[in-house]
Image (cartoon, rainbow, N blue to C red):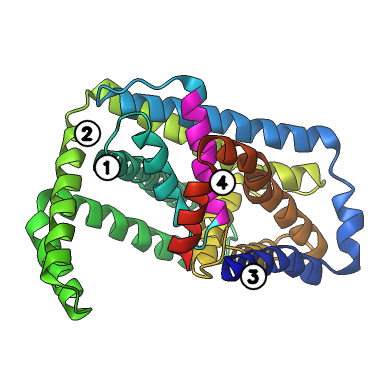
């Protein structure tokens, strides 16, 4: 528990310290340029995105015959987002998701399958967004640096999609590789067999999702697209609220790459990596103070606010037992 709180303090220190260091003494005057209506607009966009995700969860669960009220689905989503932001590498997200859905009668393997489909839809959106940005930049050439970001993010997304497809169509290969990895770490045969059964059960539930009607899958994807378009417009609108501007496509790319870099720090919320990379990429078009201020606003809306608003919801829905489990898993 003590180790977790040290990580949390380090995470917050880096999250605030890096923009303050990069922005310098001009940072606070620049921050005052953001009028309160702009901040309220950004928070309203996050609330709307949460509701879109709640509808997505209801459709996913409804496809398995489980009905969840909108308020309950919204609480599960907000609690899951809080757990993602509060645990190293976002490891608490799937644990919270499956824990809460199990209270609605969904087995853990089925809940994990729904979470996997949810993530698969996200990866499809990101890949489509990268392809759209690439096509846009080819048709309308612009002086945009860091084109290697597109290649890096594209490779990560393709690898994730390929792994998901392998699990469905080449599960024997996945079982073979997993078995060898577990044997390398000298886990007992009983543990290896238990893991293999869990993978097979997970695959079976994943195949069940493939039986969803096309209209359901299309609606889920459209809701996913709406959520991410709202969330990835936050940085663009924050910069507009500060009196500057960048292209929306570049803002989306900055956020995608910054969050990917943040995951590499293995700190809660990707602190440190997200702020540093975001400020560095924005400094190409903005002065250091404006870039740092934009990153602070973006992180407040998509990280600090998730912790502030999500903590009471998580406490009400999950409580101390799940929090202790998340702490033990992160140590």
Quarter holding residue 177: bottom left
Mark 2: secondary structure: helix
Precedes in sequence: disc 2 or disc 4:
4
Residue behind mark 4: 82
Calculate the distance from the C-alpha at mark 1 to the C-alpha at mark 2: 8 Å
Look at the numbered discs 1 and 2 and tell me whether their residues touch, using CB distance below 8 Å: yes
Calculate the distance from the C-alpha at mark 4 to the C-alpha at mark 1: 21 Å
Calculate the distance from the C-alpha at mark 3 to the C-alpha at mark 2: 40 Å
Q: Whole-percent x and y of residue 123?
A: 37, 48
Residue behind mark 1: 113
Residue behind mark 3: 6
The prevailing secondary structure element of the residues shown in magenta is: helix
Residue farthest front in this picture:
321
Calculate the distance from the C-alpha at mark 3 to the C-alpha at mark 1: 33 Å
Q: Whole-percent x and y of residue 82?
A: 56, 46
Residue at left offset 24%, top offset 24%:
214
Q: Which residues are magenta?
A: 72-86
Mark 4: secondary structure: helix
Instruction: Residue 209: give its label.
Output: 2
Is residue 248 on the magenta stretch? Answer: no
**Between 186 and 310, the one nearer to me in the picture:** 186
Residue at left offset 67%, top offset 52%:
299
Mark 1, Cα crowd under 10 Å, few <14 / some 14-19 / many 20+, is many
Q: Whole-percent x and y of residue 20?
A: 80, 66
Precedes in sequence: disc 3 or disc 1:
3
Calculate the distance from the C-alpha at mark 2 to the C-alpha at mark 4: 26 Å
């Amino acid at each position: 528990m003590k180790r977790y709180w040290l990580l949390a303090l380090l995470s917050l220190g880096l999250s605030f310290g890096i923009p303050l260091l990069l922005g310098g003494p001009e940072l606070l005057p620049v921050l005052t340029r953001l009028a309160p209506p702009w901040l309220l607009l950004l928070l309203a966009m996050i609330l709307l995105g949460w509701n879109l995700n709640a509808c997505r969860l209801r459709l996913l669960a409804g496809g398995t015959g489980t009905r969840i009220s909108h308020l309950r689905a919204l609480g599960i989503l907000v609690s899951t987002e809080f757990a993602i932001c509060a645990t190293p590498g976002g490891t608490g997200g799937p644990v919270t998701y499956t824990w809460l859905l199990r209270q609605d009668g969904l087995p853990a393997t089925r809940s994990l399958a729904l979470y996997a489909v949810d993530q698969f839809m996200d990866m499809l959106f990101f890949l489509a967004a990268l392809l759209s940005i690439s096509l846009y930049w080819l048709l309308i050439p612009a002086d945009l640096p860091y084109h290697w970001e597109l290649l890096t993010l594209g490779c990560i997304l393709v690898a994730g999609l390929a792994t998901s497809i392998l699990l469905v169509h080449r599960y024997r290969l996945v079982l073979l590789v997993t078995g060898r990895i577990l044997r390398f770490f000298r886990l007992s045969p009983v543990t290896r067999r238990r893991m293999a059964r869990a993978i097979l059960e997970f695959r079976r539930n994943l195949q069940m999702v493939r039986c969803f009607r096309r209209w359901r899958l299309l609606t889920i994807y459209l809701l996913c697209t709406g959520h991410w378009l709202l969330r990835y417009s936050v940085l663009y609108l924050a910069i507009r609220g500060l009196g500057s501007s960048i292209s929306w496509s570049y803002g989306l790319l900055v956020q995608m790459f910054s969050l990917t870099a943040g995951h590499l720090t293995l700190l809660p919320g990707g602190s440190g990596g997200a702020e540093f990379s975001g400020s560095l990429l924005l400094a190409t078009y903005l002065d250091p103070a404006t870039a740092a201020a934009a990153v602070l606003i973006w992180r407040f809306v998509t990280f600090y606010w998730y912790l502030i608003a999500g903590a009471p919801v998580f406490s009400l829905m999950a409580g101390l037992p799940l929090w202790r489990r998340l702490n033990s898993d992160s140590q």
